[in-house]
Amino acid sequence: MTTSTAASRRIPLVDLPAQHRDLAPEISAAIDRVFQSSHFILGEEVAAFETEFAAFCEVDEVVGCGNGTDALELALYAVGVRPGDEVITVAHTFAATAEAIVRCGAVPRFIDVRPDTLLMDVGCIEDAITSRTAAIVPVHLYGSCVDMPALMQIAERRGLTVVEDAAQAHGARWGGRRAGSFGTAACFSFYPGKNLGACGDAGAVATNDRRVADGIRGARDHGRVGKHEHAVVGRNSRMDAVQAAILRVKLGHLERWNEQRRQLASSYSALLSNLQVSPVLASADCDPVYHLYVVRVPDRDRVRANLGSEGITTGIHYPIPLHHQPAFAATSSPQVLPVTERAVEHIVSLPMFPELPVSDVERIATCLSASLTAG
Ligand SMILES: *Cc1c(COP(=O)(O)O)cnc(C)c1O
């Protein structure tokens, strides 16, 4: 492939410096405010973020914590998941989803995904339910939503609790309702590269259940009920005030950023429509937020190498499904998940971030096209 030097400028998968360049004055002012108060952990700034993010998610309460993995573990424990329980989830997700389940002493029961969306196949839930099943953890991967009305119907009928992993889906909707507002609780991550990212680690639980929120508020702060009284054995997973202040600034831009991501996704899908590329789709009822833009291609590794040699960074989310990870071998029984196993051989994540110029999307599509026909 030949390209001009100008066209060979590197395109990253995610560009945080671009986001922070625009926001630098606002972020500096927010950090100054925290230094002036010198209240660095929890406090007013965290409480204000919790209120604002709860309004954004259209839920009653949000509890900030140290990171998204802790949020999931704290939520699972707060809804009553205990050692020996089984929790139904997918193997096609980030390791944290199953880590949180195992950290509660429970056993992940992995089920397959749908071939169009690569999200939990709700039709596989019933077959995975046993007398030990306590909860279901749907994962809104890539910024798309699992079919939550269908899932909630099964959960209600079978008496199971639902904790959503919404770590990649800040602002997504299903049938007009926000991801993270369907289950008993939902976890969010504010890892820097997420659609809403802190400048360090942070996470939160969203819930409409007062008791769950209060349980997590205690558990994240040493089980405290007063300054010196510890009602339960808790832990330390508090949110930093500096992160909360930065998240408050960024939350004001999130709807616009998500809209920019949707526009870029529609440019990608128009440009790729005639190629041997099949984009991972969102269901018609879902309004996705494209945390990642993922396509399936034949001969994936060669295509990635070609794009890489043209300065285009790509990723794989995720190459090894969790039922094949050594970490979970001891806590999950050997399984075959055909759709998951086939998908991970072909998926590739293309550059996707709100500041990505449309001209770069065009360059990526051209390169992808050349690399597919060169095969
Ligand atoms: C990022 C992520 C998490 C974990 O969040 P951290 O803040 O990194 O702990 C959990 N689940 C999914 C699907 C994620 O993408």
Image (cartoon, helix red, strand yellow):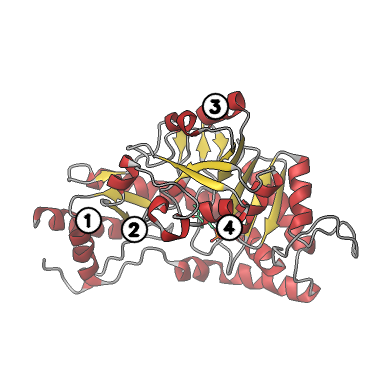
Residue appearing at x 60%, y 71% in the figure:
25
Disc 4 under 8 Å from ligand 1? The reply is yes
Point out the tag, 3 or 1, that comes first from the N-terminus. 3
**SS for callout 4:** helix
**SS for callout 2:** loop
Indicate which label's residue lies in the foreground, 3 or 1.
Answer: 3
Query: Looking at the image, do the residues carrying marks 3 and 1 touch, with CB atoms under 8 Å apart?
Result: no
Point out the tag, 2 or 1, that comes first from the N-terminus. 1
Q: Which residue is disc 3 drawn over?
A: 154
Which corner quadrant holds the C terminus?
bottom left
Mark 2: which amino acid?
Answer: Ile
Mark 4: which amino acid?
Answer: Thr
Residue appearing at x 77%, y 41% in the figure:
210
Mark 3: which amino acid?
Answer: Ile
Residue appearing at x 37%, y 42% in the figure:
118
Could you say which disc has been placed on residue 300 in the image?
1
Q: Position of residue 137 (x, y in %)?
A: 54, 42
Alpha-carbon span between mark 4 and mark 3: 26 Å
Alpha-carbon span between mark 4 and mark 1: 30 Å
Disc 1 under 8 Å from ligand 1? The reply is no
Alpha-carbon span between mark 3 and mark 2: 32 Å
Question: How crowded is the residue under tag 3: few (<14 C-alpha within 10 Å), some, or many (20+)?
Answer: some
Question: How crowded is the residue under tag 4: few (<14 C-alpha within 10 Å), some, or many (20+)?
Answer: many
Q: Looking at the image, is 79 positioned above or below residue 50?
A: above
Query: Looking at the image, do the residues carrying marks 2 and 1 touch, with CB atoms under 8 Å apart?
Result: yes
Q: Which residue is disc 2 drawn over?
A: 316
Q: Nearer the viewer, residue 30 or 278?
A: 278
Q: Which residue is disc 4 drawn over?
A: 69
Residue farthest to the top, as pictured: 157
